[in-house]
Amino acid sequence: MVVIRLARGGSKKRPFYSIVVADSRYARDGRFIEQLGFYNPIARGGEIPLKLNLESLDAWVAKGAQLSDRVKTLAKQARKAA
C-alpha cells in the first residue's frame, strides 16, 4: 500500500520532517517514491514551518495513496493557508 507520511530528519532534539510518498513496507526514514514537501515543527522567526505541494498530494490521493493522520492535519493547514 502506498502511504503519504512524515520521514524524520534533523538532529537530536531538533526534528525536521519530510513529507514523502512511500510504500508502507519501507522503513520510516528509508526509501520513498516522491518528496512532496517538508514540516518544521520548531520553526522560528522567518523560517517556513510547512511547505506542501498540494497538487501532487491530490494526484497521489486520486491514485489511491493513504494519508497518515498527521499528514491529514498538515494538509488541512496548508489548504487553509493557501
Image: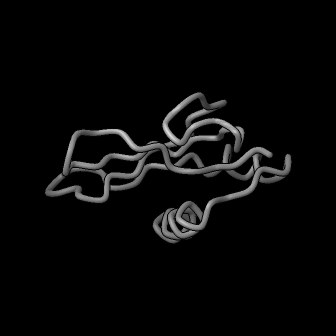
Image coords of residue 1 (percent x, y): 80, 46
Q: Residue at x 18, y 52 (%)?
A: 46
Farthest-out residue, right: 63
Q: Residue at x 40, y 54 (%)?
A: 50
Image coords of residue 33 (percent x, y): 66, 30
Closer to the camera in the image, 23 or 57? 23
Q: Residue at x 76, y 46 (%)?
A: 60
Closer to the camera in the image, 31 or 50? 31
> Left or right: 55 with respect to 2?
left
Image coords of residue 11 (percent x, y): 23, 39
Q: Quadrant of residue 36?
A: top right
Farthest-out residue, left: 45
> Left or right: 38 with respect to 12?
right
The way the protein has been coloured in the rendering is: one colour
Q: Is residue 21 above or below residue 31?
A: below
- How many discs mark residues in the rendered view? 0
> Left or right: 65 with respect to 78?
right
Image coords of residue 18 (percent x, y): 45, 42
> Left or right: 71 with respect to 65?
left
Q: Residue at x 85, y 46 (%)?
A: 63
